[in-house]
Image: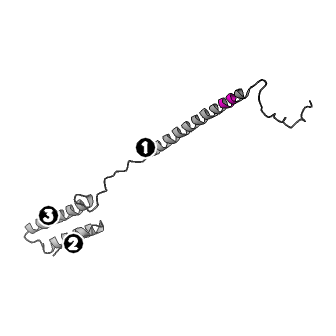
Amino acid sequence: MMAPPRGRPAARRARGPHKGETFKDQIDRVARHMTRFGVLLLVVLLLGCGAFAQTAHAQDASQPAQSLVPTPSACSAGSQSVRVCTNGLQSCNDVCAARALSANADVAGCSTSCCNRYNVCVQMRNCAALKIDCN
């Protein structure tokens, strides 16, 4: 038999039955190879799923859990926006009351001014529904 020319790989001989191998032996050999391939494929799939689960879990941990409780309105009773405006109105009215105690202080329109400031405060916070009548 002649050697193949240099630089070119020798052609592979097709795998056929081994010497003295019966058909049942061939089936058993193929079944073993398929079993090995199936186990290898299963291991690769499990490792891939595990890596995906770790990545998904890491992303979940970095993001805060979303609450099902609706976010309260900025204009609801007790919200910071309402407290700021209400506290401002109360402070302004306290100043008006203190001025009224002074004999020569001009308090005309003081409470109306406080009321108008309160209305501007709630308007700036998009809570116009909380405006009060200043008359």
Instruction: Tell me residue 66's x, y (percent).
Output: 37, 50
**Residue identifier under label 3:** 94
Return the disc, 1 or 2, that comes first in the chain's sequence: 1
Q: Is residue 26 above or below residue 116?
A: above
Instruction: Please tell me whether mark 3 or mark 1 is closer to you in this view.
Output: 1
Which SS class for mark 2?
Answer: helix
Looking at the rendered structure, the kind of residue marked 1 is Ala
Instruction: Tell me residue 130's x, y (percent).
Output: 23, 67
Looking at the rendered structure, the kind of residue marked 2 is Asn
Res. 116 mark:
2
Q: From mark 3 to mark 1, how far is it between C-alphas? A: 50 Å
* Viewer-side residue, 97 vs 120: 120
Q: How many other residues sit within 10 Å of disc 3, few (<14), some (14-19) or many (≥20)?
A: some
Q: From mark 3 to mark 2, how far is it between C-alphas? A: 15 Å
Instruction: Tell me residue 19's x, y (percent).
Output: 79, 25
Return the disc, 3 or 2, that comes first in the chain's sequence: 3
**Left or right relative to 7: residue 59:** left
**Residue identifier under label 1:** 61
Which SS class for mark 1?
Answer: helix
